[in-house]
Image (cartoon, helix red, strand yellow):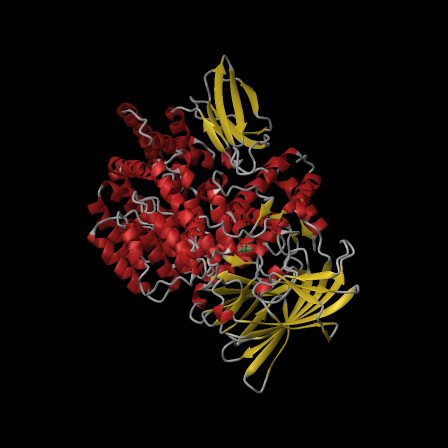
Amino acid sequence: MDISTNPEMADAAPAPHQPPEIFRKDYTPPAWLIPEVSLDFALDDTRTKVTSVLKVTRNPAADTDPNLRLNGDGLEAVSILVDGAADNSWTMDGGDLLISLPGEKHEITIVTEINPSENTQLMGLFASGGMLCTQCEAEGFRRITFFPDRPDVLSVYTVRMAGSKAKFPILLANGNNTASGENADGTHWAEWHDPWPKPSYLFALVAGDLVANSDSFTTMNGRKVELNIWVREGDEGRTQHAMDSLIRSMKWDEETFGREYDLDLFNIVAVSDFNMGAMENKGLNIFNTKYILADPDTATDGDFDGVEGVVAHEYFHNWSGNRVTCRDWFQLSLKEGFTVLRDQLFSQDMGSEPVKRIEDVRILRLAQFPEDSGPLAHPIRPDSFREISNFYTSTIYNKGAEVIRMMRTMCGEEAFRKGCDLYFERHDGDAATCEDFVSAIEDGAGIDLTQFRRWYSQAGTPKVSIRLEHSGQTAQLHMKQQVPATPGQPDKAPMPIPLKIALFDRTTGKHYGEHLVTLSDAEATLSFDGFTQPPVLSVNRGFSAPISVEREMTNEDLVFLAARDDDPFARYEAMQDLVVGYLVAASGGGLSDADRTSARASIGEAFGAILSDEALDDEMRGELMILPSQTYIAEQSVPADPAAIHDEREGLKAWLGAQFTDELMAMHQRASAVPYSMKPEARGARKLKTQGLIYLSSADPVHGAKLAKKQFDEADNMTDRQGALMVLCGLDQPQREEALAAFHKRYDGNALAIDKWFALQASSLHPDALKHVKALAEHPDFTMTNPNRVRSLYMAFAGNPQGYHGSDGAGYELIGDVILALDPINAQTAARFVPALGKWRKFEPKRSAMMKAQLERIMKADKLSRDTLEQVTRSLG
Ligand code: B3K
Ligand code: ZN
């Protein structure tokens, strides 16, 4: 009987079938190894034939299992040969192919056929803008051919591909190009060999009409490496920054980590349809165009930094990820956390160290803290998953990096380097675990990390309460830690928390040295002598631990630190605390008029000190001026009322803008006189210009719109142009439409710039943002099949603290619609929208119920991908 025809049964519809949960504790080594693979691709847009020859051998380190399990996803074998003969000993288990093998060594030949043009999931082999390319991490290789698609099976690959020379003049794969040739029928072929054994997730192939920006790099041992950045014709003029970044990364990794590149060739290809930022395939990185293409006219300073950071990140994976890979996907942070740390340290060295540190903490707080305090919380080494794509999270990446950074802080840079050297030496060529990494740091650096390992197993952002008591000559620091309960982890043990602290003398404005203290127990008290009056405490300097600090501190002391702390992060933090404290209290309705006046006066005092401090560089000044995000304030005020937070935050901006109009105008004028360059002072000036506009337009929208339009019209670079347009987008002034039209006209056809045009409108503070988003979805430039475009409209909107949280719930409904519409097209991207609804428990009851109702609606859909189903289930659970 059809269940839908029986109303009673329809009501009691069972929960959708859940894919199996996979547990870290169940890991077993593969029964069969594949030392060598040969792949042959007959390339075609709609019918690519893949012939795979696998040399398989029994794994002596595993239990005997006659079955060779070859993972497949949506594949059908056209033919299967075992040792050259047709074979019928195979069976299917779901999408997987099982072949029963009698001996110790066999050769398996399998032919599959795939359709890259229909592949809207962008996993496996897919078509993008006329070219064919691959994405295999984590489990995309099984969409190309049957294979043990797990990271602990390492093979040497030889790849041959053939296809139309006119359509695919450039044929690339991992490793080195060993042979190529032409056929009489207009096709050509190329053969590639990668000498380094690698897991299937690092396989890559690209075929297309591409042009290269080429250069070379000579390694520390004199190996000359050919470097190519491949893009579509016309884009090559925007690749130089990526090339410079690559060369700087190669040099930096030699100097800082002693890591040298290991092939004669390094190729990067930029594609416009890509689920994420980039992919570190061995010798053939594939990038989202967003992280390759940059010039002053089309890319902001932030975009330039993004290119530099991602190019470095992917390059650094060559050691932290490729030479030493992961045993299983539970170890993802082994490569991702470590590589994020490496790219952060690189970017710190390339530009302003404090500004980079503040930016990284801001990302952590915006993306990771909400994960840690919500239904999707998981440790940096998860214990289970249903769909690994859902675990490419800020927790794995950003908190993973913070955890390794803490080890570095605790053992010191030199000892940390020794630990890293030992890790690479011990595990080169291995599929390793997080435990292997921690042990290598322990042994190499000579440090005991027994208790520290809890950072790998416990989820949740620790809260540390700090109180300073003073009597006589002694200051006592009372510290208490609490690691909150998270799903599946109700009870937590204390973790070692390294805290850099300094105690300032409030008369001299100086401190007597920084201390590194480690809070290992639930509570501890430390005494410091020699203070005749209570010192001012500066704590978690440099953000030495990824925790949230609750410190009992007067506004007066916060102003003191915001104006003069010599640790730039602590100075920023004092300013943030001052504002967060005010906005949380004000939006919660718990502030008397007198308290409001006095808190604003303190914020004004600190803000004034920041504007006028001549010792500050402008990049840092701009950083200190940025108010804490609405999302961060909402996190601090559960249950949050987004409308109240918005009103208070806007009120404070307008108040500061009015109080400091003259200073901000003078600052804007001074900054506008600095000519465009990539020098820090010019970048700082650009940051100040837009920060100035933000406050001035808040205080006086009519005047602000004029000033913003002037900045927009006179801009000779994207940073100024986008900054001005961002401000204009939030204003209900006539200049808004004029500037939007001019921007679209100027950049018509430039996908990355048009993405900005969508994103600025979708994230704007304009009261009609939702209406704008709905209209933009109908714009001819909008498409659901390009992830960048989808993100620029809908992800920007889901992060819009005002529009998304409209009191009628229409924003939630829109995101619910997007998830349902996108799920069959691109499940990975669809699932990324679920956390926007999944934070329902943090909001006031009315909004909370409406967000939850959207999750329940999605849950009822006929068919959901594994990705979305897992995220919705966890979010409701
Ligand atoms: N390792 C890739 C991410 C792959 C994501 C798969 N869903 C990029 C990176 O982290 O460098
Ligand atoms: Zn990575």
In-front residue for pair 293/189: 189
Q: Can residue 576 be seen in this view?
A: yes
Note whether 475 is above or below 711 in the view shown.
Answer: above
In-front residue for pair 531/487: 487
**Does residue 13 appear left or right of residue 844 in this picture?**
right
Seen at 38% across and 36% down, the residue is 633
**Does residue 278 appear left or right of residue 847 in this picture?**
right
Q: Residue furthest bottom?
A: 184
Note whether 392 is above or below 492 in the view shown.
Answer: below
Q: Residue furthest top?
A: 472
Q: Where is residue 33 in the image (x, y as percent from the top left)?
A: 72, 60
Q: Where is residue 722 in the image (x, y as percent from the top left)?
A: 33, 54
Q: Can residue 222 be seen in this view?
A: no
Q: Position of residue 572 (x, y in %)?
A: 42, 36
In-front residue for pair 816/247: 816
Seen at 35% across and 44% down, the residue is 801
Note whether 51 is above or below 383 in the view shown.
Answer: below
Count how many numbered circles sit on residues in the image: 0
**Does residue 751 appear left or right of residue 120 in this picture?**
left
Q: In which quarter of the image is residue 509?
A: top left
Q: Position of residue 862 (x, y in %)?
A: 45, 56
Seen at 46% across and 22% down, the residue is 505
